[in-house]
Image (tube, rainbow, N blue to C red):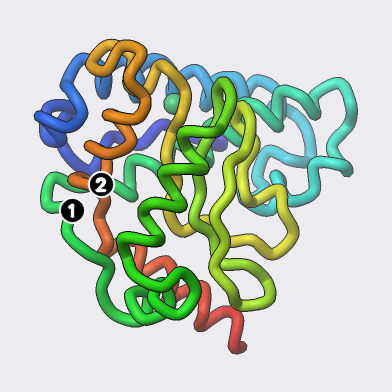
Amino acid sequence: MPHELSPLPYTYAALEPYLDERTMQIHHGKHHAAYVHGLNQAIAGTEFEDEELAKLLGRLYQVPEDIRKTVRNSGGGHANHKLFWDTMSPDGGGFPNGKLAVKIGADFGTFDQFRELFEKVALRHFGSGWGWLVLKLDGNLGIYSTPNQDTPYMQTGDVPLLGLDLWEHAYYLQYPNRRAEYVRSWWNVVSWKTVNQRYEAAMDRHHE
Ligand code: MN3
């Protein structure tokens, strides 16, 4: 099978008390696994089997209609969750570092102002979806949300730096009916080291 469910880079309990073990088990072992399975089934035997996922999601309009919806939902789900797990760490929290810290200051003012805007977008998003910090093609940072499993890879040139799962399956066991509390707790596990590395890698590609 071309796409695989990688194990988490930490244990299911590693992000407690901010994200509980049971939620992480179901989220990774059932939800994410189902996206990988759905994607593999849809593209089996097609020319898309060996294509890099971000590239495939960037040209959905070229995917035949009978599998396009599955590639969009399951492929987007696989890409989003992979990024989500890698964005978090038991050593997370604190503040952005390096060039990203400077850029957040330039584009949003203070880190608190950035966080406030990100939370506003995450809390205003209706229904299932994702909150994003992206690097845009013009070199500016952007904050927005996407519905369902839609992903910044579908927006030409956008590179996702930070993604927050806003589906109820991501938080409802631990934070029933309390998305705001989930969003605010989440900052404690964000690996700014990883987010900064993504930013610097994207800037390097940008300048090539
Ligand atoms: Mn999810």
Disc 2 or 1, which lies upstream in sequence? 1
Q: Say which quadrant the N terminus sits in.
A: top right
> Is residue 98 rendered to the left or right of residue 5?
left
Counting from the top left corner in percent of width and height, residue 187 is at 25, 47
> Is residue 66 rendered to the left or right of residue 70?
right
Task: Name the residue at 34% across, 30% down.
Answer: 180
Task: Name the residue beneath numbered marker 2.
Answer: 187
Residue furthest out toward the bottom: 208
Residue 77 lies in quadrant: top right
- SS assignment at label 2: helix
Comparing 188 with 208, the one in front is 188
Residue 177 lies in quadrant: top left
Comparing 97 with 85, the one in front is 97
Counting from the top left corner in percent of width and height, residue 26 is at 31, 15
Amino acid under disc 1:
Gly
Residues under numbered marks 2 and 1 in contact, where contact means CB atoms less than 8 Å apart: yes
Task: Name the residue at 33% across, 75% down.
Answer: 101
Q: Is residue 94 visible?
A: yes
